[in-house]
Image: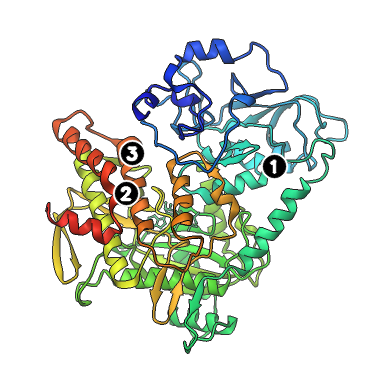
Amino acid sequence: MNLLKRDVHASFNLNSSYENSCFDITTALSEKQFKEQHMPTTPSSNVLQFGKSHLHKDKIEKTIDSVSTPSRGDVFKNPFKCALSPIGNWDSPNQKRRENSVESISFDVASSYKNDLHPSLAENVVSLQKKSSNNKLQLGSPLSLVLQNKNVNRALKNVCFDSNIVTRGSRNSPSISSQIMNKGITLQPGKWRKSLNTWRRTQSLPSGNPTKLNGDYESERKVSLTVAAHRKSISCRKHSSSEPTKTNFKRQLLGRCNQSHVLRFESAYSDPYLECCEKIGEGAFGEVFLYKSPTQKEADNVVLKIIPIEGLQLVNGEIQKTYEQILQEVVISMELCALGHENRGISFANGFVNIQAVKCVKGHYPAHLQKLWEEYDDRKESENDHPQCFMSDQIYVVLEMAFSGKDMEKFIFKNAEQSYYALQQIVFALAVGEMVYEFEHRDLHWGNILIATTNEKYICYKLKNQVISLPTKGVKATVIDYTLSRITYGDCCYYNDLSLDKDLFAATGDYQFDIYRMMRDILNDKWETFEPKTNVFWISYIISKLLNNVKYKNNRTKLHLEYIKKLRTLESTILSYKSCMDFAMNLIMDI
Ligand SMILES: Nc1ncnc2c1ncn2[C@@H]1O[C@H](COP(=O)(O)OP(=O)(O)OP(=O)(O)O)[C@@H](O)[C@H]1O
C-alpha cells in the first residue's frame, strides 16, 4: 500500500492515512484525470474553494482514529509545501505571486460572520463584494474579499466563520490554511497548538443562527478551558514534604529563579539590553527573542522565551499557565540541562537545551519588545496576540537559553549521513533522560528539534557508565519545549495531564497526530505513568520526517543513498524497541 500510495498526487491526498483516503489507491488518477472527474466548472455551495481550484467537500469527508502512513515527500516536485494537505502553500507554476501582492480569498455561500467587520480586516480590504450598508458582512451570501497578502492571516484570525469554509493560506501563513472538517481536525504538521487555536477561532456558527457561536462547541470549549486552568502538572507521593499549594508552587518557582520576590520587568531587563534583541520565534505560550551581545561572541548571545502566567486573560486562545504548570516546564528544563555537565556521575548527555537562567518578572510588556513583535509580524505574520494586551500586573516567566540553531523543519542537511547522526544524538539524549529521570518528551515534532552546525568532530554521552563518542558530521541537535514532557524528580512526577484534551486527539494531517493517539493508548490515558515507548514513537516519527520531508543539499550522492537505506531499515524496525535506552544499546554495537 505504501508503494501504491507514492503515486497518489500529494495535493489530493488529504489525509496521510490510506484508510482515510477518499481515492481508490489502486487506480490512482493523474492530476488531469482527477480534475476532469472531480472538479466542476462552476463553483456551487457544495464546493470548497481555494485559489482557482474546487473540490467537492463530500470527497474529503473523512474519519479519524486511524494510523497514518507518512507519504513520500519526493513524489511530486513539491506542488504544495505541506505534502499532506491541498490547502498548503501552493506555488502554482502559472500563478507567480509576490509578497504583499493582492490575494483573493473566496468564501462559500454558507459563510456567515459573528462580528462586524474587524478593523484590521476593514483596513486591508481592497474590494469587498456583497457588503451591506451598515458595514456588516451580509450573512449567507457569497463573499469575495480581496486582501493584501501579507495581512490575510492577521485579518482572518479575528473573525469567526463557517465550518464549510476553506481558506487558502498565503505564502507565509501556513497555519491559517488548516482545514475545517466536520468530523476531525486537520492541522498543519509541527506546532500543532497554534494550528489548533486557529481552528478553534474558526469554529462553526450554526447556519440558522449566525450571530451565535455553535452552542455545543462553545460549551465544550468552556469546559476544556476550565480543565486547562486546573490541569494537574505535578503529582507527589503522599508522604512528600512538598505540599501542593499555590503558595508552595510560587515559592518553588522563585527558588528556581534565585529570587525572593517577583521583579519588575524593567529592573530585570533594562532598555539598552532589550534594544539588542530581535524576535526569532513564537509558540502558543511564549514569544522568543534573541539578545545579540555587543561583544559579538556567539556564546554571549541569549535566547529569551517570555511566557505570561497566572493572568485571567486568554493569550493566543490559551488559558495562561499557572505557577504549578510553569514549574513543571522549568523543573524539567533545568534538570535536563544539568544532564549536560560531564562530571555528573554515571550518565550525561548535552542534547537538551542549555538553560542559563530563569526569571520571574511583572509589568507591562516592554515597549521595545512590542515593537519587535510588530516588526516580526510585518515580516512573517505572527499568529500570536499582540503583547500590548497585557496589563501592568501581568506576571511572566522568562527562560534564558543558549541559541541552539534552526528548527529541523527549516534546516537544510548536507545529506542523509548528517541527518542519520543527528537522529542518533537525539536517541542518546532521550536514553540518558529515560535513565536518570524517567523522561518522556511527548511532543518531539520537528519544530521542537533545533539543529546547528558545529566544528566539533565528536559529541560524548555517558550511559550506564559507558562513554559513547558519536561523530557529529558537522551538526548538533538540541531538544526543546517540554510543555508536554514528563519526569520523575524527587518524590514528584512532573507531567501534563492530557486526558481531557479531546481536540488534540481528534487531529489528523500528519503522522505526528497519530503519535498523540498512540501515546494515549499505550499510557491508558494515565499521563503520570512512565512509559518510555512514547519516546520510541517520536523517534519513529523523526525517521519518517528524515526520509520524507527534511531538505537535503546533496541528495544524489552514493553516501546519501547509503544512509537513506540505513534510515529505511531503522524505519522498519524502530517500533520493536521498548525505549530509547533499548534502541541506544543496539546502536552502540554499530559505533
Ligand atoms: N534555544 C533556542 N534557540 C533557538 N531558537 C529557539 C530556542 N528556543 C526556542 N526557539 C525558537 O522559538 C520557537 C518557539 O519556542 P518553543 O517551542 O519553546 O515555544 P512554545 O510556546 O513552547 O511552543 P508550543 O507552541 O510548541 O507550545 C521554536 O520553534 C524555535 O524556533
Q: Secondary structure at mark 2?
A: helix
Label 2 or label 3, whichever comes before in sequence order: 3
Label 2 or label 1, whichever comes before in sequence order: 1
Pointers 2 and 3 in contact (C-beta within 8 Å): no
Callout 2, which amino acid? Leu
Residue 419 visible in rendering:
yes
Callout 3, which amino acid? Val
Task: Using the numbered discs, state the Cα–Cα distance from disc 3 to disc 1 in whole angstroms.
Answer: 35 Å
Q: Secondary structure at mark 3?
A: loop
Residue for badge 1: 120
> Which quadrant does the N terminus fall into?
top left
Q: Nearer the viewer, residue 54 or 260?
A: 54
Q: Is residue 188 above or below residue 368?
A: above
The quarter holding residue 468 reads: bottom left
The quarter of the rendering in which ligand 1 is drawn is bottom left
Task: Using the numbered discs, state the Cα–Cα distance from disc 2 to disc 1 in whole angstroms.
Answer: 48 Å
Residue 414 visible in rendering:
no
Q: How many marks on residues?
A: 3
Residue for badge 3: 550
The quarter holding residue 258 reads: bottom left
The quarter holding residue 534 reads: bottom left
Residue at (75, 49) in percent of width and height: 216
Callout 1, which amino acid? Ser
Q: Which of the two discs, 3 and 1, sits closer to the camera?
A: 3
Q: Residue furthest right?
A: 133
